[in-house]
Image (cartoon, rainbow, N blue to C red):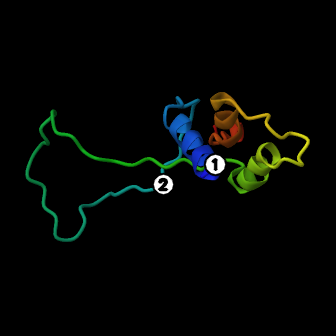
């Protein structure tokens, strides 16, 4: 249950993070998909559902970090992390070389 909390907290925090700079286009369409037809302009008030996925850092260390604070024989037992520490550890990385 604690791993789920750490992952959930990191996801929630990263969802509200503001972009730092450049971006990468992962998918682009130059033509309409087969079977589609253009009818006109979309109503500006229309809502278009969309998902944006960001790659998180250090996800593979979640179990190890959880055990450090929750196992009674650990030197870090009981030293639980703040929401900010969780967010900082698992937030998506940004590579400045891609600008």
Give the residue drawn at x 58%, y 29%: 20
Q: Nearer the viewer, residue 68 or 96?
A: 68
Question: Earlier along the polypeptide chain: callout 1 or callout 2?
Answer: 1
> Taking 78 as reference, is 99 left or right?
left
Dot 2 alpha-carbon crowd within 10 angstroms: few under 14, some 14 to 19, many 20 or more: few
Q: Position of residue 88 (x, y in %)?
A: 68, 34
Cβ–Cβ below 8 Å for labels 1 and 2?
A: no
Residue 97: image quadrant is top right
Label 1: which secondary element: helix
In this picture, is 8 found above or below 21?
below
Give the residue furthest to the bottom. 34
Q: Nearer the viewer, residue 36 or 77?
A: 77
Residue depicted at 81% across the width and 49% down the height: 71
* Residue 75, placed above or below residue 1: above
Q: Nearer the viewer, mark 1 or mark 2?
A: 1
Which quadrant holds the C terminus?
A: top right
Q: Say few, some or many: other residues with alpha carbon within 10 Å of mark 1 (under 14 / 14 to 19 / 20 or more).
A: few
Q: Position of residue 39 (x, y in %)?
A: 8, 52
Query: Can you tell which mark lies on residue 68?
Result: none
- Residue 46, by quadrant, is top left
Disc 1 from disc 2: Cα separation: 33 Å
Tell me the residue that label 1 is attached to.
2
Side (left or right) of 79 relative to 50 = right
Q: Position of residue 1 (x, y in %)?
A: 59, 52
Q: Residue furthest left?
A: 39
- How many numbered dots are placed on residues in this image? 2
Measuring 62% from the left and 42% from the top, which residue is drawn there? 92
Element carrying mark 2: loop
Residue at (64%, 51%) from the top-left corner?
3
Relative horizontal placement of residue 88, taking residue 76 as reference (left or right): left
Label disc, if present, on residue 26 of the rendered structure: 2
Q: Position of residue 51 (x, y in %)?
A: 39, 49
């Amino acid at each position: 249950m604690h791993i789920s909390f750490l992952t959930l907290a990191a996801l929630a925090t990263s969802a509200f993070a503001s972009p730092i700079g450049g971006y990468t286009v992962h998918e682009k369409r130059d033509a309409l998909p087969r079977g589609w037809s253009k009818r006109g302009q979309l109503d500006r008030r229309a809502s278009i559902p969309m998902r944006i996925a960001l790659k998180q850092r250090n996800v593979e260390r979640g179990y190890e970090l959880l055990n450090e604070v929750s196992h009674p024989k650990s030197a870090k037992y009981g030293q639980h992390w703040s929401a900010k520490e969780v967010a900082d550890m698992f937030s998506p990385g940004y590579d400045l070389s891609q600008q």
